[in-house]
Image: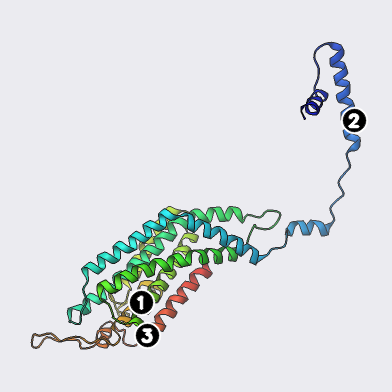
Amino acid sequence: TAAPAEHAVETVSVNYGSPETEASSREVLAKLSDACKKAERPLPAATPAKTKATAKGPRRRPLAELRLLYQRARRDVSRAKAATAIKAAQQVMTALIYGGIYDLDDSQRSIQDRFGLLSLCVIGATNLAIASTIRAFPKEKTIVQRERSPRSGRPMYGALPYLFSKVAAELPLSVGLSCLFGGILYPLAKLGRTTRKFRRFLGLTALNSVAASALGLLVGAVAPSTDAALAMFPPIIVLMIIFNGSNISDESTPKPIKFLPKLSLVRWGFEGLAVNEFEGLEFKPFTQIGRPSLKTGADALTRLSFEDSTIKRTAVAQGAILGACYFQT
């Protein structure tokens, strides 16, 4: 195999051994050049139809794109073992801390304790979900924009297949972490001791976490960089905490911003958990004479103007925010 290669190199090289060999090698090169020019054939001119087809590029196959993007997203999630372990440890530690502090019963003091614990659960879940997404997505957005830059007149893949694949790949992890937190906290804090309430608690916390991730995705898509996204995060979470349903009433909210409570994931998550927890509860009255007591969970919900609220209403509100965030993304 070496002889043909050496012969080819010698043929296209100039031999400077003597004037005769140099002239002979240059003559060979000139003949090869003339032969190559004669062998060249002009390319046929592209017709308008072919040019148009080339501009459009190959036909897009959304289902194939979705499948391939989902496989890639699943690999990315499975490779991030260290990050997943840290998130799981955070959920376990937070649940153990809350469970060690709160010991709920049917006394009057437990009413305030229940509201406080449920509020902490929602704030923590929302905070973690948004922060995790806005830290990672701006970097991923740069890669996606480069991959979707027009090649042969068409992006490599569509925006919808990418979004659906990303959500489908990350959804099990998000729901699993929320259920891990709720499964540890619920029995430790002695929240509503029925299977139905426990299932609804897990469902509501998981829905809140997924909706918060969607909001984080929207913030990450709007922000030009990770630093900008992180700068936008504190005002958003602070406003949602202020309008969580217990810090300020809807009637006291200034008119120009009366719409903000309806956009607060913390408010809808807290309201749903409160309705689920206080439904059907009865409390022992204070032993002190003349001190007003709340007899039932319905009375406690009335104090926060949640008497007309339902779990379905809060779930629909969070679902609407989730859908709006994905649509805007």
Q: Amino acid at mark 3?
A: Thr
Q: In the drawing, what numbered circle is on residue 87? A: none
Query: Viewed as shown, does residue 119 lie left or right of 139?
Result: left
Q: Secondary structure at mark 3?
A: loop
Query: Which residue is at 56% across, 56% downward?
Result: 144
Q: Is residue 329 visible?
A: no
Query: Which residue is at 44% across, 69% downward?
Result: 210
Q: Amino acid at mark 2?
A: Asp
Spot the residue most to the left.
289
Counting from the top left corner in percent of width and height, residue 162 is at: 57, 62
Q: Earlier in the sequence, mark 3 or mark 2?
A: 2
Q: Amino acid at mark 1?
A: Phe
- Which sits in the foreground, 43 or 107? 107
Counting from the top left corner in percent of width and height, residue 272 is at: 35, 79
Q: Earlier in the sequence, mark 2 or mark 1?
A: 2
- Which sits in the foreground, 117 or 190? 190
Circle 3 Cα neighbour tier, 10 Å, few/some/many (<14 / 14–19 / ≥20): some
Identify residue for label 1: 201
Residue 51 vertical position relative to residue 13 in the rendered view, above or below: below
Cα–Cα gap, marks 2 and 1? 83 Å
Query: Which residue is at 88% across, 18% downward?
Result: 24
Circle 2 Cα neighbour tier, 10 Å, few/some/many (<14 / 14–19 / ≥20): few
Q: In the drawing, what numbered circle is on residue 34? A: 2
Identify residue for label 3: 310
Q: Secondary structure at mark 1?
A: helix
Q: Secondary structure at mark 2?
A: helix
Query: Viewed as shown, does residue 194 lie left or right of 155?
Result: left
